[in-house]
Amino acid sequence: MPEVMETLGRHRLLPVVVIHDEAHADGLAEALVRGGLPLAEVTFRTEAATAAIRTMSRRHELLVGAGTVTTAGQVDQAHDAGARFVVSPGLSPSVVRRCAQLGLPVFPGVATATELLAALDEGVSTVKFFPAQTSGGPAAVRALAGPFPHVQFIPTGGVTPGNLNDYLALPHVVAVGGSWMVPAEAVQEGDLETVTALVREAVALVAATQGR
Ligand code: 3PG
């Protein structure tokens, strides 16, 4: 199994990071590792994204990917900065194809069976289910998985400590993604204690229901 899938399947959580200042990237990396979750999706929603990916990727124990990737050009920037996977809010064939050329695992966002079929046509086997909670939540994932038993889902969007295990109980869900573990304000204020505590709480919630 590719390393990215193995890591996602082991931790079952994907923190979605919005970082405004690259100076906070190393502290954030430290907080994630200390909290027991050595992976992150750094979103291309800020100017600091590529620099943050570069800084965080220097820690070899941390698996860093790029999120909110919407163009093939951003795939190149993410790859150059050291991103090891790519997440997109929707399905862009040009993003998926550029990732394939570079050998980067890519998880495009889908919310319907038609979008899922288009993703399969592009050779994708793991999708982000987005926005998860407003697109029907765990019941929608279960229904979509029926006709697509070989697809793996990463539900993201509205996932919280209160509902994450409803998603993770589904056999087709490899992991859930979310920003609640890494609040942008806490990252911006350098409040790494808060980030570490939220990450630890999420890790413990997953462990508790999986008998770890
Ligand atoms: C994303 O880009 O994946 C979402 O913004 C994350 O959704 P959340 O903030 O509801 O966790």
Image (tube, rainbow, N blue to C red):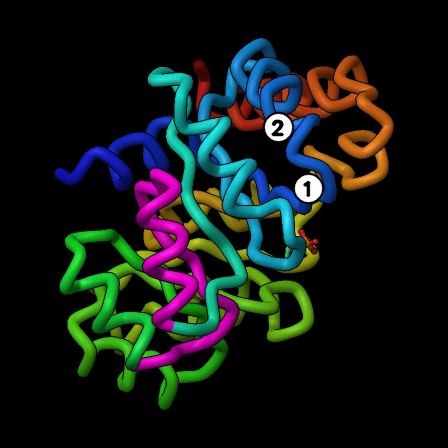
Residue at 32 percent of width and 30 percent of height: 7
The answer to which image quadrant residue 57 occupies is: top left
10 or 71, nearer to the observer: 71
Q: Is residue 83 left or right of residue 21?
A: left
Q: Where does the image place residue 161, in percent across and percent down from the top left?
A: 70, 37
Magenta highlight range: 72-93
Circle 1 packing at 10 Å, graded few (<14), some (14-19), many (20+), is many
Label 1 sits on residue: 19
In primary-sequence order, the first of circles 1 and 2 is 1
- Say what amino acid the circle numbered 1 marks: Ile
Relative vertical location of residue 78 with respect to residue 121 in this rendering, above or below: above
Q: Is residue 195 left or right of residue 209?
A: right
Q: Are marks 1 and 2 in contact (CB under 8 Å)?
A: yes
Label 2 sits on residue: 25
The answer to which image quadrant residue 194 occupies is: top right
Q: CA distance from mark 1 to mark 2?
A: 7 Å
Query: What SS does tag 2 mark?
Result: helix
Q: Where does the image place residue 85, in percent across and percent down from the top left?
A: 33, 48
**Residue 47 drawn in magenta:** no
Count of marks overlaid on the render:
2
The answer to which image quadrant residue 65 occupies is: top left
178 or 113, nearer to the observer: 178
Residue 42 appears anywhere in the view: yes
Query: What SS does tag 1 mark?
Result: loop
Q: Where does the image place residue 132, in percent across and percent down from the top left?
A: 59, 64
Residue at 53 percent of width and 39 percent of height: 51
**Residue 85 drawn in magenta:** yes
Q: Where does the image place residue 119, in percent across and percent down from the top left?
A: 28, 77
Residue 162 appears anywhere in the view: no
Residue at 21 percent of width and 33 percent of height: 3
